[in-house]
């Protein structure tokens, strides 16, 4: 059986109209995919390669997003977290991406539990 390949624009149209499309069927043709269409693919768990995502910054509506101030950054209220900045092996990095783990949500829990564990160990252990 021959694999069928669907041009990405046609795949978007099919998805919008309720048709099932598999990621392996989509041909992105190494083209830049606008973020709006990437959002449609994401909705159906279809991953667009990061290097093909086109962000048209001039046309992104950010009116509902509060402005980030320099004070937010200086006080630590806002912190940028990029997965490539963490020294992780490829297996863990792939797991994070494939499971869609949001590091900004996970890290506070991990740090809180780590802190409590360290306090408990110091409290109950003669050092």
Image: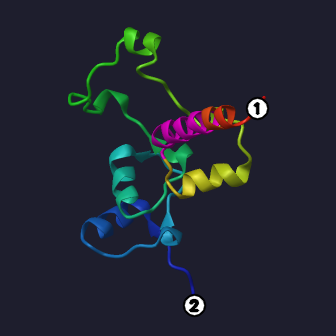
77 or 120, nearer to the observer: 120
Image position of 111 (left or right of 71) = right
Q: In this view, does 103 lie above or below 100?
A: above
Q: Which residue lies furthest to the left in this view?
A: 63
Q: What stretch is highlighted in magenta?
A: 102-118
The quadrant where residue 85 appears: top right
Q: Callout 2 environment at 10 Å: few (<14), some (14 to 19), or many (20+)?
A: few
Tag 1–tag 2 contact (CB < 8 Å): no
Position of the N terminus, as image quadrant, is: bottom right
x then y, percent, for residue 103: 52, 41
The answer to if 104 sits in the magenta stretch is: yes
17 or 90, nearer to the observer: 90
Image position of 49 (left or right of 60) = right
Rounded to the nearest angstrom, the CA distance separating label 1 from label 2 is: 68 Å
The quadrant where residue 44 appears: bottom left
Q: Which residue is drawn at 36% across and 29% down?
A: 57
Q: What element carries label 2?
A: loop
Q: Name the residue under label 1.
A: 126
Q: What element carries label 1?
A: loop
x then y, percent, for residue 70: 40, 9
x then y, percent, for residue 31: 50, 50
The answer to if 71 sits in the magenta stretch is: no
Q: Which residue is drawn at 53% across and 31% down?
A: 81
**Res. 1 mark:** 2
Q: In this view, does 5 lie above or below 52?
A: below
124 or 22, nearer to the observer: 124
């Amino acid at each position: 059986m021959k694999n069928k390949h669907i041009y990405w624009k046609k795949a978007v149209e099919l998805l919008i109209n309720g048709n099932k499309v598999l990621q392996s069927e989509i041909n992105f043709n190494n083209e830049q995919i606008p973020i709006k269409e990437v959002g449609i693919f994401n909705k159906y768990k279809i991953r667009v390669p990061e290097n093909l995502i086109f962000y048209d910054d001039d046309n992104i509506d950010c009116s509902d997003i509060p402005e980030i101030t320099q004070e937010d950054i200086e006080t630590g209220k806002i912190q940028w977290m990029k997965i490539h900045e963490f020294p992780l092996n490829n297996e863990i990095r792939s797991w994070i991406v494939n499971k869609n783990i949001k590091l900004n949500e996970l890290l506070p829990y991990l740090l809180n539990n780590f802190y409590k564990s360290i306090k408990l160990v110091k409290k109950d252990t003669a050092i």
